[in-house]
Image (cartoon, coloured by chain):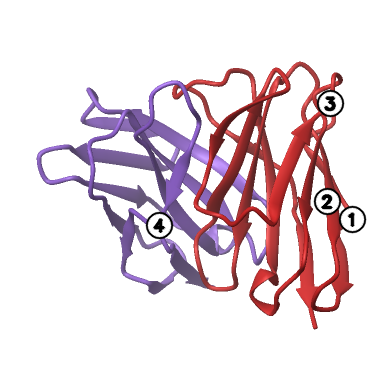
Chain colours: A red, B purple
Amino acid sequence: DAGVTQSPTHLIKTRGQQVTLRCSPISGHKSVSWYQQVLGQGPQFIFQYYEKEERGRGNFPDRFSARQFPNYSSELNVNALLLGDSALYLCASSLSQGTTGELFFGEGSRLTVL
Amino acid sequence: SQQGEEDPQALSIQEGENATMNCSYKTSINNLQWYRQNSGRGLVHLILIRSNEREKHSGRLRVTLDTSKKSSSLLITASRAADTASYFCATNAYRGAQKLVFGQGTRLTINP
């Protein structure tokens, strides 16, 4: 079975632009979460979606938004990019929405903002 | 903000030795998980320990949890070069939501 897949793997944007990152969860997984990992830091929670509804939101500005589609894939959108948005964006899926399970991570999308 | 803090930030040992990494956190938790990350790639889940458990084993991994001290440790026995990676602890303190709070990680280097 395929794992969590993310696209694109690398991208370069300039300040003020907008970016859309995509994630396909493991087949059968209904929960998708997004994390931002700045170089040298641990991942920070951005969003969790379960059954197409937002279940959790981290401490990120409104420039960050996400959605989940009927097939459980997800998109993360970031508007008005800042230099500080340069990071590895990780998507993770799991079977349940709750606290009991492990997360399965994709390889990430590395965003560079110039 | 990051709830967990790993100690040490970096650890370098010889192949075959044991590696111990520690994690401290600030709030009550439902469970604590350890993940491994190879050089800027995706994270791989290693082990989950629930708040009512004190110790758990998986292969060469041993995790302990002390909720009174709000701390956990990860022991890797008989280390191998392939264990070279960054290791993160992550806590889940939220009911009904999967919001993991990660520490800053321990960068482990195994020298052949």
Give the residue pinned by disc 3: A69
Question: Which chain does the numbered disc 3 sit on?
Answer: A
Kindly check if marks 1 and 2 are in contact, taking CB atoms under 8 A apart as contact.
Answer: yes
Query: Looking at numbered disc 3 in the image, what kind of residue is underneath it?
Result: Phe
| Disc assigned to residue A85 | none
Query: Looking at numbered disc 4 in the image, what kind of residue is underneath it?
Result: Gly
Residue A12 or residue A78, whichever sits in front = A78
For discs 3 and 4, the disc positioned in front in the rendered view:
3
Query: Looking at numbered disc 2 in the image, what kind of residue is underneath it?
Result: Leu
Question: Which chain does the numbered disc 1 sit on?
Answer: A
Give the residue pinned by disc 1: A8
Give the residue pinned by disc 4: B103
Asked which secondary structure carries label 2, the reply is strand
| Label 1 and label 2 in one chain | yes
Q: Residues within 10 Å of mark 3 (few under 14, many from 20)?
A: few
* Rendered residue at 34%/58% (across/down): B18
Give the distance between the C-alpha atoms of the residues marked 1 and 4, in whole angstroms: 26 Å
Q: Residues within 10 Å of mark 1 (few under 14, many from 20)?
A: some
